[in-house]
Amino acid sequence: MDNDLFSLEVILTRVRDGELNKSDAAEILISFMEGNDNPEICIECIDILEKISYKSEIVFKILENYLISDKSPSVRNATVKVLLNNFFKESINSILWTIEHDNSPLVLKSIIDFINDCEPQIDLLSQKLYNWTNEFASDIDIVPEEAKFFLDLEALFANGNENYIIDTDTYKHFQIITNYKTKEPWLVLKNQHVEHLNFNYFNWKYIKDNKEYIESLLKLRNLHLFLSSIQGYYISDNMSVKIPGSIGLLTQIKDLNLSGNKLKEIPLSIKVLTSLERLDLSKNEIQEIPEWITSLRSLKFLNLNNNKIKKIPESIKDLKSLKDLRLNKNNIYSIP
């Protein structure tokens, strides 16, 4: 496999150096794709096809076929990005078919992101995506604006899992499973808005990956202890989680718990959550408290225990509503 990838890199280099024309390079890349079942090879070929900027009906037909029929969501995701950027008009019907039939959050997220960034937006595709988003939001019983965050979570869970498909049923279980300390559910919705979110990527992903055992898991006397005991088996020391920026769309959230996600920094997107009253970022790897934290004007409780914070900024005093600040087990050497 490594030799194949090296060969593909040589093709790109030769095209850029003028030693190989784009038509011949495209033919070689297509032969690589058709003669190989390895998703990584196919994705690399698709990536190079885009980099050499070669457009032809043959290339379009090959990519369209991969979008419609390939078993790998990663390959379909790579394909849909090239089609949207280079063959948009030709691929409209294929994209519409994909919206209706593809269950991969990776693929659907790429289409939605493209349309959101496209000016002007394409009416037919936008309407199709609007209908799909409304249906997705309805399944979770949440407003469409906030559903974007949950689609981004689905894409996060799908990363590295070729067999993952969109699943909204588990969000009903997340409204039942409770935090072992606060006894609050992992997810609380009020009037179709997120009011409380206790998101630990590793715990949520385990439930997602083992949803066929959900009834048995819910019967455990101490689900938290069980999840804690198995985390070490599939979490590497250098692993970190990136919270989707769309968390900033949860404008009515009051209680947010992101404890134990190996976060290196406080997500900037939290800055706009001005209704937030409780924020738990304990047991992460956060090194500093950003100045923008003062924008959380409703914040009453801030837990930063068990991090790597060295300094408390003077601006912390501007959190006028703050009543409870927790900073145990950090590396603090400077207190204003």
Image: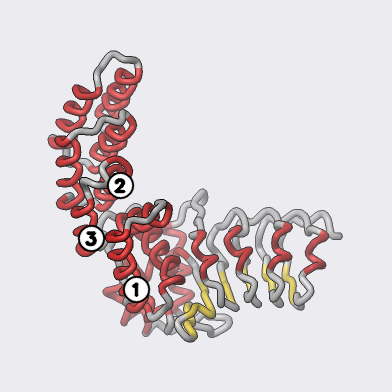
The outermost residue toward the right is 336
Which circle marks residue 178 in the picture? none
Q: What is the three-letter code of the residue carrying label 3?
A: Asp
Q: Which residue corresponds to mark 2? A: 84
Write down the quadrant of residue 42 in the picture. Answer: top left
Q: How is the image coloured?
A: secondary structure
Number of numbered discs overlaid on the protein picture: 3
Q: Residue 186: percent from the left, percent from the top?
A: 48, 78
Query: Disc number at residue 102?
Result: 3
- From this view, report whether residue 107 is shown above or below residue 328: above
- Which of marks 2 and 3 precedes in the sequence? 2
Q: Confirm or deny contact between disc 2 and disc 1 (CB under 8 A).
A: no
Rate crowding at label 2 as few (under 14), some (14 to 19) or many (20 or more) other CA atoms within 10 Å.
Answer: some
Amino acid type, label 2: Leu
Report the side of 173 relative to 43 (left or right).
Answer: right
Kind of residue sitting beneath label 1: Asn
The residue wearing badge 1 is: 134
Secondary structure of the residue carrying tag 3 is loop
Question: Around disc 3, counting alpha carbons within 10 Å, would you say few (fewer than 14), some (14 to 19), or many (20 or more)?
Answer: some
